[in-house]
Image: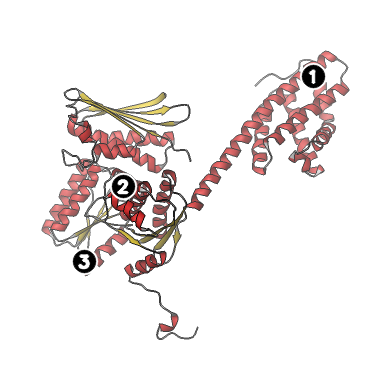
Amino acid sequence: MRNLKEKGGNALSFVSLLKENSLQIAEMVTLLLQQEKDNKYATLDREDLLSRNQRIVEAFIRCLESGEDQDFTDYIRKIGHERALEGFRLADVVTALSRTRDAFISYLEKTSNDPELLFKRTKIIINIIDQARLKIGEAYLQTREEIISQQKVALIELSTPVIPLFEGILIIPLIGTIDTGRAQDVLENLLQGIIREQAQIAIIDVTGVPVIDTAVADHLIKAVQAANLLGCTCILVGIGPEVAQAIVSLGVYFTNIITKRSLRQGLEYALQLLGLEISSINSLTGRSNL
Amino acid sequence: MNTPIMEIDNILVVPVQSSLSDAAALKMQKDLASIISKRSIQGIVIDLTDVDLVDSFIARVLVDIGGMTRLMGAITVATGIQPAVAITLVEMGLTVEGVLTALDLQQGINKLRLLKKEG
Amino acid sequence: MGTFQETRVYLKQELDIVSARHAGRLLARQIGFNLVDETRITTAISELARNIVLYAKEGTVYIRTVYTNEQKGIEILVSDDGPGIENVELALRDGFSTSRGLGAGLPGTRRLMDEFEIKSTVGVGTQVLVRKWLRSI
């Protein structure tokens, strides 16, 4: 905590002067920001913008008054975090702080008689705002990074869906290239899906996977084996002859890898395993009118 | 150290505790062998829900138990293998041959009864 | 590469394998590995520690955090003054085993970790060094 307090009787009156005129200063900030092209703050409704600026001006004055910057720093960080969530650009928030600085300095210039004192006070304001710009940048970027991480997780879940059918059957449609990272996600999602849905059969459809080389075949076999350890039988569908070659060339661990040509055949087989079949309603006897 | 072995209608149920030392695993195997030799048992359900690590030694014990029960005309089902454990086993190349698996204890018992019924 | 936070477990009896696993799991968790990686790491430690107890009779496992400029991870060094491995290449081949274990020990461990190095001299001893790095999404 740096010592921002001015010494002497002048100091108190300087701060009270700012306090009395905080609205005026906030209005100046508002005016400056509304002139900024491309700044999101400029698109805000005037009342909204003014009250935001009032809050920051008052927080800044409290900082000058108390002589310590911890509260102000916390406040600035909070703003950085919130604006990041609201979709402001980093440039928008940093510029807003710069205009706040400009408004304060401009006000001091107008009301000061003593150039030396003016210089000292200007320096203090510039220092505080410099620090604040750094803090707001950090808080903003941290929040942006958290948002991006969350989006990545959501994307992974979207791209490796595990769809429960009925009777403990899962369908996993794989689409697109499967690299090592994605294969790991598919594997974990598959196992979590088996547990969640108490699935006994998982149909893995690779029709939509353009390239299945030995590496991908290896990943698939791994997934099947892991599912087997959870008591779930896997049916691979959509495997053409080239892919069949790739799997055979790996030579190992063939037990419980059932393959069918199409999803339809896979589903029919799955139902068969469970002792079920699909038939039309008319063929059911003794069915009363609903 | 002692893994409890319970009996439900000719099926032995073994809820394995989380930190299974090598010695405890071997003792469990010995106890199971002893019970099976004396009684007519349809099978064993070994529940690994609480087990957070299965390495090659434990895997070998499971395979041995599976082989032993088969020789005596019974079936072993391992249940509740945790996803992280399943992934690790598969990556290491351990497939626990000769041991059936099921998602949980209940499904394991069901599987066992179903198989025994089919003869 | 920087290293911090080291735990050492002296391996002589079978129960020491459990201690080594436990230490590994704790550090892996602290570093921030997810559950699957945590399990991989702990299982690798179990395999390596057991090799010592079975073949070398005694040794030490060192478990530490490692850093580079870009990554953070875990490093495990298993060291013994035992008989050494005569044919390292053979030992690294799948299915090789001299005792009742399934022989998945070394090759299996290599597959679980990102980096694997082994140095062994007959009559002098063996050192195995493995590392796993935090996976960034």
Query: CA–CA distance between discs 3 and 2?
Result: 28 Å
Q: Are marks 2 and 1 on the same chain?
A: no
Residue depicted at 23% across the width and 65% down the height: B115
Secondary structure at badge 3 equals helix
In the displayed structure image, the side of residue A212 where residue B59 appears, left or right: left
Q: Amino acid at mark 3?
A: Lys
Q: Amino acid at mark 1?
A: Ala
Q: Which residue is mark 3?
A: B116
The circle drawn on residue B90 is 2
**Quadrant position of the N terminus of chain A in the picture:** top right
Chain of the residue that carries numbered disc 3 in the rendered image: B
At 75% across and 36% down in the image, what residue appears? A55
Which residue type carries mark 2? Val
Q: CA distance from mark 2 to mark 1?
A: 73 Å
- Residue on which disc 1 sits: A11
Sequence-wise first label, 3 or 2:
2
